[in-house]
């Protein structure tokens, strides 16, 4: 379990890792094997026993949520050892580590020290401007991408409605890949000119890239990908910097190494050096970011086989009941030997080690096998029916299991929203925790700040002041009694006729706190409320005085008073930077406009991914009796007693069988091409001096293979989230053309034939 | 004032040095050099030396404050005044004086028209006119990532470096290029730099404009001989303060003067050189020693307690510098607080300061510094101090003027008072302006709710041109809510503004000289619409009056002084430039609007705060660390905030220029790489830490927050150095090693 203060008793495989003192170590861990805890213990041990002055242990993780998790655990271990808790190590994501490197030497990569790092949202805005401008200048440029048999009306509608979005997606992938290859727009254009063949799709993307990059320069900003590119550039150019960083980061511990991109591997390899100390922990079977990034599980496989690398397995897992473990292991075997697609059997997207239950006497025993329940619902649902089925199942199950944890995992955010909508519209009594895109915490933090700004924009309205009070007391929401009290005080505040009588009573004038009958009645029954409201008044006065500060500074002042979580503070800072950007471009913006902007972020109208979408560590145990609704991707690293998997059909989990549709192969694209894959292939071909031709369509085929493999791993990840109960359904899709995924059919067959588990309907 | 009997023997010796001869006073900060020099100054005057025979030169005005104060307080024989100035001050005066002679030989367009001296901001304005078209039309500077304002200032910086180091400005690119360790594709930016500064220089010469660089160059090449001649007809006694903070150009001037003067005191702080980024050169300063007859070594600190000295020495050794072992307990001179969040650090510092004052420490003996001080940090800290009844003062030079709330208030009122601009203020800005203007102390404060109510009731948006309504015309219940006390003051402000509008719209008066300008807009006829006059009258006649918001508000007064000074400089420069291009002078209201636009765009920075300041009130100083150093006043207790941060060792990065590569000591052909940067950083940290400690009497209190203001987990060099010290002193973590935010160490007084 994450973050539990329970004493750590390492089991044999974990002890082997803890015996590490240097060199290169590769660890293939299975789901639930306690790798975070083991790695944290190792980090603390190295800090305590192996470091000299000026050295540090560098821990690289995948997402910000893991940063907090690691930090907490390492602090705990260091505390147990009687050491200062914040010295000797640093936990970073690839991005924040690169930001450290670049910040350390901005001059070297031609940045000023005040450079801004754009969050994905602002970057997306700039990109979408670039696409719009491009299409305006070249209205017919995209014609060659569309299928020839479209009629004019349909074509016009596509160009108007679908093309800008599609082109933005393609260009975004193209730019990211170009930056991975360390190619700036001029170089891409040059390569394209030199190439023997015209590559119109790449040329189009290159033009958009150029205009996007100008947009960044104009703002004195870099995007996330630039940060990595520039960090690598600094390390490769400046030997002294590299030497210094090598000396500083004596040990590098890398978590989630299966999702390491080529660039991350290159950077860490550089930082580690020939004889350095580098521990890579990962589970290649859980690599699920291949299609979005240049992540590639093969990199970790190869590392494990490298000469000079000690390879260790962490195969024991106390997470799931044995039947669920058997199911996951069967998926590994079937992929290699039984999958209907020969190319996939050969690629082996899933490989051993198999998961093994913990040995007897282990402090973390597997749930008893007889409590396991595995259900593959064979009915072909429509999407709406599937949602209804799951909602009804939850409604039946939940009341009797308030102490258990439960999640619904969906392949895409949209399915999650559909389920939540259904639950809300039908007033089903199912408390949900939504962990979808733009995490709740992002919206909450933006909402908290937005509400205070809104009040400051209308400082004489009692309604908004009352809202500020509720925001200030937002921690009471989880406790019905305290929440009721907060609402009551808020109600009284909202009825103040003149807020200034409360906030700043004039000398000799009326003082609401003393004279109002509502307030008096409240203090009668609830004496502490008087002090509390006085403290609240002091705070609001301070904020009133801060209202004259520049917007970003105002936000930081508010955040300092309102937030205690690292993610929230960091988020407030990102928001402050975004709003400062607006302030410098829109001289006439005042609080109402800034508030509106924050509100739109809070409403999730626009994506704000300044942080990873999983900025805050989500702990399922804090949400017992409620249903977490999240994507299969975001569920990584988490576990629940009961897990529902939705949409396990041939569209979301294709197998390369005839008649399947692929998300990236648009029906309106010429020859059914996967335009994104083709654009990337054109870029790659033009950049590679040994490639002389580009064959259209080959990349589309390759992309299918990759997708099929990655989706099998996603299924594996999803199955292994369940501790005791797993319920899997599928639907026929919007076009009613999808069937159960091949993996679904096989696992269902296996469970029925081989496992002694309950299979009745739920 | 220091009495002779309070001087140390060494100081007495320095003060009574003969009135002929050149003396080099050397030693770390806090050893009493300046006090000795002041004593000598007073002695010379008392012994009958004519005041105007004494010339005191400091690298920047704040460093001359002890002399100014001493002369103000001293009971001196009547006569002229000793001159206290800077090198650029002298240069400016001399060039103005000898313009007819200098202009033709220096290549200026006209000796008949007067020269115009550009301040940093007017220089930036001119640079913007030159660079913007290059950036927008010709794609200049595409390979660097840099906000526009910083682009201008770095270009100007290059010119300044060339001037003070003493190489032709046309060599900037060829000096910068070989040192560049980054992507060779970016090298083109230096050619663009060169072209831009060449164009700027040509423009200046063609318009009789002297920015700082051209001022220094012209003075060094064409003004120095005549000037020295003239100066030493009167001046014969020199005091050169903090020469280590001055530039090679200044040192060259000093060398020639040392040869001519009757007596000289040259003061040199070792381990300082905080103005390196402005071209200060310690090595060339220490070269002045050779031009003196005698050196006096000041080494005993009169400021730091033995513990602080021991701490300084320990830390210096940890930082790899030589330092003599000092008897004393370093652990008694510092403590630290480890908090999880930055705001908790602020609470700790505010509480600590309040507690020290309660125990009898004078507030003026407490400073709270951080390497950088954002508005949020400064605001939050001052608020927390205020909540504990502690008065604070704060200096923060070089920030955008528009970020000063009082400046924004003044701009809103200026828009209101000049309806002819067609730029009515936003009602919210007006509310803030009223809040700032009409508050009076804690009890008479105008809160935001009332200010809002007042602005939105008295300033109807539809009414055009926008005017404020009289208080009595507001609905009675609104009047009552706002209170009549506020209403009365509101009316005074409103009537003042109305009077201004009437006066500026009045027909032309006979006695108003038209300064050769033609009628340009219909409101030409006016009392005096110059913005600087408006600001200064508004402040002097209303806002600083008793009962109004800025009464006795020192921070605001500084900001307004800066605004007035800046607007005046801007107007003067613009009038001259315009007059040069066309006989039709630029209209004041055009200049005023342009000025408002510049301030609101953030281009105009507050360069004036801390110029020749008044003696400080007895209040806790909240300032960036370097500002505290340049104020050069010790304090008993120093709180160092954000001690875990990286700002303690980092310089401001300037991709288009370079403080070291463009210095005298840089060897042509060397490359500035990460090692150079790292060494520079460690050096910077050493100087800063030692500089602060030498100005510390009793103790340093370190505030460490695990999560910075930005939510990041910074681990800078400073905390690393202290961590090593802790290990050496064998001070265990914090006893239980784990409870964060718990006070520890052995702080005096907390």
Image (cartoon, grey):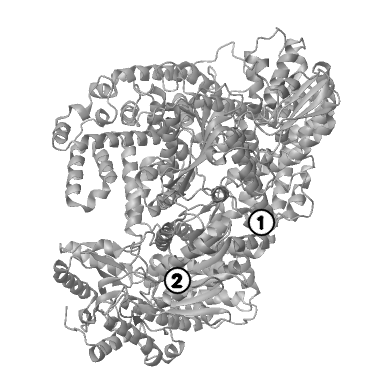
On the rendered structure, is B314 left or right of A341?
Answer: right
Tag 2 secondary structure: loop
For this orientation, the residue located farthest to the top is B78
Above or below, comparing residue A226 to residue B323 in the picture: below
Query: Which mark, by number, is residue A256?
Result: 2
Q: Evaluate whether residue A199 shows in this view.
A: no
The quadrant of the rendering that contains the N terminus of chain B is top right
Q: In the picture, residue B583 is in which quadrant?
A: top right
Give neighbour class at mark 2: few <14, some 14-19, many 20+ (Cα, 10 Å).
many
On the rendered structure, is A296 left or right of A417?
Answer: right
> Depth check: B743 or B706 in front?
B743
Tell me which residue sits at (78%, 36%) in the image: B286
User: Residue A287: where, in percent of width, then height?
Assistant: 43, 76
Dots 2, 1 in contact, CB < 8 A: no
Q: In the picture, residue A350 is in which quadrant?
A: bottom left
User: Residue B328: where, in percent of width, then height?
Assistant: 59, 37
Give neighbour class at mark 1: few <14, some 14-19, many 20+ (Cα, 10 Å).
many
Tell me which residue sits at (18%, 37%) in the image: A492
Q: Are marks 2 and 1 on the same chain?
A: no
> Depth check: A295 or A15 in front?
A15
- The chain letter under disc 2 is A
Find the distance from the CA under tag 2 to the CA under tag 1: 31 Å
Tag 1 secondary structure: helix
Q: Evaluate whether residue A220 shows in this view.
A: yes
Query: On the image, numbered disc 1 is attached to which residue?
Result: B674
Q: In the picture, residue B33 is in which quadrant?
A: top right
> Depth check: A404 or A125 in front?
A404
User: Residue B46: where, in percent of width, then height?
Assistant: 73, 10
The quadrant of the rendering that contains the C terminus of chain B is top left
Query: Which mark, by number, is residue A534?
Result: none
């Amino acid at each position: 379990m994450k973050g539990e203060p329970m004493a750590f008793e390492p089991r044999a495989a974990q002890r082997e890792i803890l015996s590490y003192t240097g060199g290169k170590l590769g660890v293939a861990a299975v789901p639930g094997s306690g790798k975070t805890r083991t790695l944290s213990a190792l980090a603390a041990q190295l800090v305590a026993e192996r470091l000299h002055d000026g050295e540090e242990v560098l821990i690289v993780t995948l997402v910000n949520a893991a940063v907090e998790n690691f930090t907490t655990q390492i602090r705990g271990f260091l505390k147990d050892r009687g050491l200062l808790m914040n010295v000797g190590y640093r936990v970073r994501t690839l991005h924040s580590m690169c930001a450290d490197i670049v910040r350390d030497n901005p001059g070297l990569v031609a940045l000023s020290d005040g450079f801004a790092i754009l969050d994905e949202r602002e970057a997306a805005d700039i990109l979408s401007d670039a696409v719009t401008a491009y299409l305006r200048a070249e209205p017919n440029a995209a014609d060659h991408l569309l299928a020839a048999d479209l009629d004019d009306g349909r074509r016009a509608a596509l160009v108007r409605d679908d093309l800008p979005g599609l082109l933005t997606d393609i260009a975004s992938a193209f730019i990211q890949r170009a930056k991975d290859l360390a190619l700036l727009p001029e170089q891409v254009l040059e390569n394209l000119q030199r190439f023997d063949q015209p590559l119109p799709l790449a040329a189009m993307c290159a033009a958009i890239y150029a205009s996007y990059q100008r947009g960044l320069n104009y703002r004195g900003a870099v995007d996330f990908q630039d940060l990595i590119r520039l960090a690598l550039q600094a390390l490769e150019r400046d030997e002294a910097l590299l030497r210094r960083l090598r000396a500083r980061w004596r040990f590098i511990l890398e978590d989630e190494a299966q999702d390491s991109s080529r660039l991350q591997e290159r950077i860490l390899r550089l930082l580690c050096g020939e004889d350095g100390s580098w521990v890579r922990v990962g589970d290649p079977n859980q690599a699920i970011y291949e299609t979005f990034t240049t992540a590639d599980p093969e990199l970790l496989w190869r590392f494990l086989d490298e000469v000079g690398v000690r390879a260790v397995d962490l195969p024991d897992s106390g997470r799931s009941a044995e039947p669920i473990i058997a199911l996951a292991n069967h998926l590994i075997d079937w992929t290699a030997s039984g999958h209907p697609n020969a190319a996939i059997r050969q690629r082996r997207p899933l490989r051993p080690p198999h998961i093994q239950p913990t040995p007897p006497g282990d402090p973390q025993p597997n749930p008893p096998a007889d409590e396991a329940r595995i259900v593959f619902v064979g009915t072909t649902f429509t999407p709406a029916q599937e949602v209804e089925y799951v909602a009804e199942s939850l409604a039946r199950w939940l009341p009797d299991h308030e102490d258990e944890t439960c999640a619904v995992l969906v392949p895409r955010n949209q399915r999650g929203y559909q389920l939540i909508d259904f639950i809300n519209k039908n007033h089903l009594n199912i408390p949900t925790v939504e962990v979808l895109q733009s995490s709740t915490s992002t919206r909450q933090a933006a909402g908290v700040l937005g509400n205070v700004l809104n009040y400051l924009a209308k400082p004489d309205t009692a309604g908004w002041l009352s809202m500020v009070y509720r925001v200030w007391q937002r921690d009471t929401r989880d406790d019905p009694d305290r929440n009721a009290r907060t609402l009551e005080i808020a109600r009284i505040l909202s009825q103040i006729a003149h807020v200034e009588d409360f906030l700043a009573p004039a000398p000799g004038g009326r003082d609401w706190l003393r004279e109002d009958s509502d307030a008096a009645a409240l203090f009668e029954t609830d004496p502490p409320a008087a002090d509390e409201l006085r403290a609240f008044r002091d705070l609001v006065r301070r904020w009133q005085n801060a209202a004259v500060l520049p917007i970003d500074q105002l936000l930081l002042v508010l955040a300092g008073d309102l937030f205690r979580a690292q993610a929230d503070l960091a988020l407030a800072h990102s928001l402050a930077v975004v709003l400062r950007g607006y302030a410098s471009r829109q001289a006439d913006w005042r609080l109402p406009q800034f508030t509106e902007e924050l509100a739109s972020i809070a409403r999730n109208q626009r994506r704000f991914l300044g942080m990873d979408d999983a900025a805050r560590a989500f702990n399922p145990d804090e949400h017992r009796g409620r249903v977490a609704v999240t994507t299969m991707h975001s569920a990584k690293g988490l576990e629940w007693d009961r897990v529902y998997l939705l949409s396990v059909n041939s569209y979301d989990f294709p197998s390369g069988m005839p008649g399947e549709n692929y998300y990236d192969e648009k029906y309106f694209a010429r020859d059914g091409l996967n335009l994104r894959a083709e654009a990337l292939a054109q870029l790659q071909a033009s950049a590679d001096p040994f490639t002389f031709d580009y064959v259209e369509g080959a990349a589309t085929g390759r992309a299918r293979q990759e997708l099929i493999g990655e989706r099998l791993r996603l299924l594996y990840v999803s199955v292994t989230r369940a501790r005791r109960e797993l319920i899997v359904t599928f639907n026929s899709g919007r076009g009613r053309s999808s069937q159960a995924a091949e993996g679904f059919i096989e696992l269902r067959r296996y469970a029925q034939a081989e496992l002694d588990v309950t299979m009745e309907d739920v | 004032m220091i009495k002779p009997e309070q001087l140390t023997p060494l100081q007495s010796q320095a003060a009574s040095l003969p009135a002929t001869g050149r003396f080099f006073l050397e030693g770390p900060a806090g050893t009493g050099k300046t006090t000795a020099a002041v004593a000598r100054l007073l002695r010379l005057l008392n012994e009958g030396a004519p005041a105007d025979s004494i010339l005191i030169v400091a690298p920047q005005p704040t460093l001359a404050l002890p002399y100014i104060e001493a002369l103000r307080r001293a009971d001196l024989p009547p006569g002229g005044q000793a001159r206290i100035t800077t090198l650029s001050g002298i240069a400016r005066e001399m060039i103005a004086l000898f313009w007819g002679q200098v202009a033709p030989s220096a290549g200026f367009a006209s000796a008949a028209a007067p020269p115009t001296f550009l301040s940093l901001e007017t220089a930036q304005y001119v640079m913007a006119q030159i660079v913007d078209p290059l950036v927008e039309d010709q794609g200049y500077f595409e390979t660097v990532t840099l906000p526009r304002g910083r682009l201008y200032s770095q270009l100007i910086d290059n010119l300044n470096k060339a001037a003070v180091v003493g190489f032709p400005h046309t060599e900037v690119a060829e000096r910068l290029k070989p040192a560049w360790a980054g992507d060779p594709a970016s090298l083109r930016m230096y050619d663009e730099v060169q072209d831009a500064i060449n164009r700027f220089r040509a423009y200046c010469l063609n318009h009789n404009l002297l920015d700082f660089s051209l001022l220094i160059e012209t003075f060094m090449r064409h003004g120095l001989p005549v000037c020295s001649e003239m100066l030493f007809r009167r001046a014969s006694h020199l005091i050169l303060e903090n020469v280590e903070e001055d530039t090679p150009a200044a040192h060259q001037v000093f060398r020639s003067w040392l040869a001519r003067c009757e007596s000289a005191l040259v003061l040199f702080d070792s381990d300082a050189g905080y103005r390196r980024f402005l071209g200060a050169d310690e090595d060339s300063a220490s070269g002045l020693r050779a031009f003196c007859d005698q050196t006096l070594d000041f080494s005993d600190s009169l400021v730091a307690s033995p513990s602080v000295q021991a701490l300084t020495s320990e830390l210096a050794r940890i930082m790899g510098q030589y330092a003599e072992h000092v008897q004393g307990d370093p652990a008694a001179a510092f403590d630290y607080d480890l908090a999880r969040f930055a705001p908790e650090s602020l609470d700790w510092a505010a509480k600590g300061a309040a507690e020290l004052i309660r125990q009898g420490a004078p507030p003026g003996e407490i400073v709270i510094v951080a390497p950088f001080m954002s508005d949020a940090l400064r605001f939050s800290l001052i608020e927390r101090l205020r909540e504990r009844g502690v008065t604070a003062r704060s200096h923060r030079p070089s920030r955008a003027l528009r970020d000063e709330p009082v400046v924004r208030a003044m701009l809103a009122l200026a828009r209101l008072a000049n309806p002819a601009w067609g730029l009515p203020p936003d009602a919210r800005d007006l509310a803030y302006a009223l809040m700032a203007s009409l508050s009076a102390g804690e009890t008479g404060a105008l809160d935001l709710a009332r200010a809002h109510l007042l602005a939105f009731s008295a300033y109807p948006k539809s009414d055009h041109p926008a005017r404020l309504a009289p208080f009595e015309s507001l609905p009675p219940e609104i009047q009552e809510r706002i209170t009549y006390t506020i209403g009365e003051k509101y009316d005074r402000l409103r009537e003042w503004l109305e009077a201004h509008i009437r006066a500026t719209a009045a027909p032309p008066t006979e006695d108003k000289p038209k300064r050769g300008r033609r009628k340009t807009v219909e409101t030409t006829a006016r009392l005096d619409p110059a913005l600087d006059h408006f600001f200064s009258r508004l402040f002097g006649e209303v806002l600083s009056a008793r009962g109004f918001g800025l009464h006795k508000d020192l921070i605001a007064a500084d900001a307004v002084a800066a605004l007035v000074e800046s607007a005046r400089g801007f107007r003067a420069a613009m009038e001259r430039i315009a007059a040069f291009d066309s006989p039709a002078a630029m209209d004041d209201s055009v200049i005023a609007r342009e000025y408002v636009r510049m301030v609101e765009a953030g281009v105009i920075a507050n360069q004036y705060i801390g110029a020749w300041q008044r003696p400080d009130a007895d209040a806790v100083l909240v300032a960036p660390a370097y500002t505290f150093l340049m104020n050069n006043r010790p304090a008993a207790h120093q709180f160092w905030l954000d001690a875990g941060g990286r700002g303690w060792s980092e310089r401001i990065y300037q991709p288009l220029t370079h403080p070291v590569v463009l210095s005298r000591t840089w060897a042509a052909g060397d490359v500035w790489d990460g090692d150079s940067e790292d060494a520079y950083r460690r050096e910077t940290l050493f100087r800063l830490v030692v500089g602060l400690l030498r100005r510390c009497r009793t103790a340093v209190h370190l505030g460490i927050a695990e999560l910075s203001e930005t939510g990041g987990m910074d681990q800078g060099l400073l905390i690393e150095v202290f961590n090593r010290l802790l290990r050496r002193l064998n001070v265990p973590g914090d006893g239980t090693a784990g409870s964060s935010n718990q006070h520890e160490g052995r702080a005096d007084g907390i």
